[in-house]
Image (cartoon, rainbow, N blue to C red):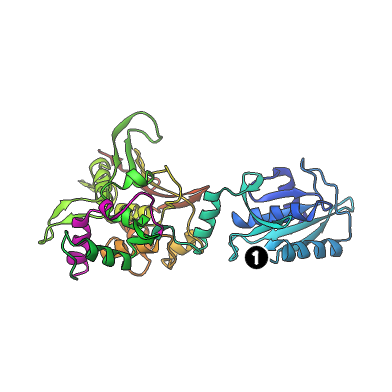
Amino acid sequence: MRRTELLELLANGENSRVEFKRDDCRAEALAKEMAALLNLEGGVILLGVEDDGRISGLTRKAAAAEGWVMNIAGQNLEPATIPVWTSVEMEDGRALGVVGLLADSPGKPHKARRGPAWTTYVRVGSTSREATREEEGRLYQAAGLIRYDIKGVPDTGLESLDLGRVANYFRRILKRPAPGIADTEGWRRLLLNSDLLVGTAGSVRVTVAGLLLFGVNPNRRLPQAGVTAAAFQGAVKGYDTVDEERVRGPLTPLASRRGSPLDRGVIDRTVDFVNRNMGTAAWLEGARRRRKSSFPVSAVREAVVNAVAHRDYARAGTDIEVSLYADRLEVISPGRLPSRVTVDKMREGIVRAARNALLKEILRDYGYVERYGRGVRNRIIDSMRRHNGTEPDLLEEDDRFVVRLWKKRPGADRSADG
């Protein structure tokens, strides 16, 4: 790291990716900061700096400081890690140590030794603290070590599922036989084998995926299941809504034997909301006036499907948000991207990892999810470029993921005609 870069970090102060530390701190204190940064998105620890940003310098030779840091990273972190070490000499001769920590550590979640115990820490702003049970669970889930979507939901059973809708899935979508509605034992066996039910202590519970996809009332036990949709008159969120709806119920549709819709699921109803509120764009080509919808339906549908398939359902009480503004559509999904998934990979269409694998597989059976993980590239990015020449925004912000579609390209002479 160059001296100018180091001075810039010092001037900006501590934040979610930068920590100041004296090099005579306790080993446990340094391990705590390492673990917290690794569990978020990596960062740097500047050794030889006071909390207020004043430079005190290393109290030992740089080589000794490096050995001390590496020993802590190997002995006081679980799993152990190897940070990137750099020492920088300042103009006054004092030296600083820079401990670089990976942005996407394959060892998440990292624990730090605290006395005889190992503790998981998280980074919140410029502070490192012990993770709550929910936060620790999300770290294991993000690392792919636990599957939240096949976890049993308390106080649920076979009666919590709409068996007519489930039978519709097996018979119409999968083209395979299913038990009669009254065959309780037949359904129990089939759904246990399909991970839509899970056995616990002699009883059965509906899994998170099962309740989301086929539940009679998913929000009763999963209040975070569903979408809050709103259309605003202007370009900012306010009280001037044109239309709003809390979209609740199972994700999947119910169709007749001939395929005609009997009941639309959350995904289709959310897309319907956008369709009726997005309006049209009009422009002149020579002497002729052209008009088309503000967004291609394929892009809207993919943005909504992406949100319901990949959101972090461990975050209780937080809906997916779908917001229409005068100039754009925003779909906000709670939770960071799953481990090993990046915005760049999504843009290139090379995403293979999934946070909710069972949920994704069943949505793929219905045709909502592309088989090769190229939905964002093909259905959002390419279709928006063809539709109006705009580039969608894909943003990971704090603990949420945002897809933003624009109604017109910058400088284009178009107007939204409602």
Q: Give the range drawn in magenta.
A: 151-175
Task: Judge whether residue 138 is colored magenta.
Answer: no
Label 1, on which residue? 79
Residue depicted at 65% across the width and 58% down the height: 111
**Image quarter of the N terminus:** bottom right
70 or 351, nearer to the observer: 70
Residue 203: x %, y % from top left: 35, 58
Residue depicted at 19% across the width and 67% down the height: 178
Residue 164: x %, y % from top left: 18, 56
Q: Quadrant of residue 101?
A: bottom right
Relative side of 253 to 332, left or right: left
In the picture shown, does residue 25 fall above or below 108? above
Task: Look at the image and tell me whether residue 123 can be seen.
Answer: yes
Q: Is mark 1 on a helix, strand or loop?
A: loop
67 or 138, nearer to the observer: 138
**Image quarter of the C terminus:** top left
Task: Look at the image and tell me whether residue 299 can be seen.
Answer: no
Residue depicted at 80% across the width and 60% down the height: 87
As shown in the figure, which amino acid type bears the numbered disc 1?
Pro
